[in-house]
Image: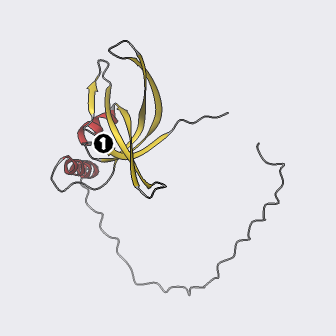
Amino acid sequence: MASLNKMTIIGNLGADPEVRYLDGGAVVATFNVATTEKYTNRNGEKVEQTEWFRVELWNEQAKVAEKYLKKGNSVYVEGRLRTELWTDKEGKERTSLRVRANTMQLLGSPNSDGGADNQYEASRQQAASAPQQAAPRQQAAPAPQQSAPRPQAPVQQTRPQRQPEPAPFDGGDDDLPF
């Protein structure tokens, strides 16, 4: 039987990412993302419940996170849930959950304070225009000379053909895969 381990989170960063450069050349960024659920309980009281997720990004995405993610940013993260076993200072075995992200996207528009988000947008625009700047400029070929206009054939209007509707499902159980 197939299995699936997929987490999708949209939330806000609780702090700037912590980035480590490892001996083998790998880069890892870790940060916390808060998601908030708001609802009204049975007593009519408004309740706000926040869940925190520890997220890790590796290599190129970690470098992007280091450059552009800041505390409070809204972010979309997709990845796998991982269980980590570790020993605390007192020698007790502990377990924690972490999202190993394979997709991260900064959400929202740049802030108007001229901070990192504007740098992100400027860098994105620069990257988008870079291939155009790097390409050698070519002169446009001269337009071909046009001769006298040709008479056009009369246009026939055709009615679109109706597609036959599919046959309804007969409800047979013979083709079901389970």
Q: Quadrant of residue 68?
A: top left
**On screen, residue 55 above or below 50:** above
**Which residue lies most toward the top here?**
91
Please name the colour scheme applied to the rendered image: secondary structure
Q: Is residue 10 left or right of residue 71?
A: right
Q: Residue at x 26, y 48 (%)?
A: 127
Which residue is identified by label 1? 13
Q: Residue at x 32, y 15 (%)?
A: 89
86 or 101, nearer to the observer: 86
Q: Seen in the image, is 63 located left or right of residue 176?
A: left
Q: Is residue 81 above or below residue 76?
A: above
Q: Quadrant of the C terminus?
A: top right
Would you identify the image quadrant in which residue 79 lies? top left
Indicate the secondary structure of the residue bearing disc 1: strand
Residue 64: give x, y in percent of width and height. Answer: 29, 39
Q: Look at 20% across and 51% down and name the residue there.
A: 118
Q: Which residue is at the far left?
A: 114
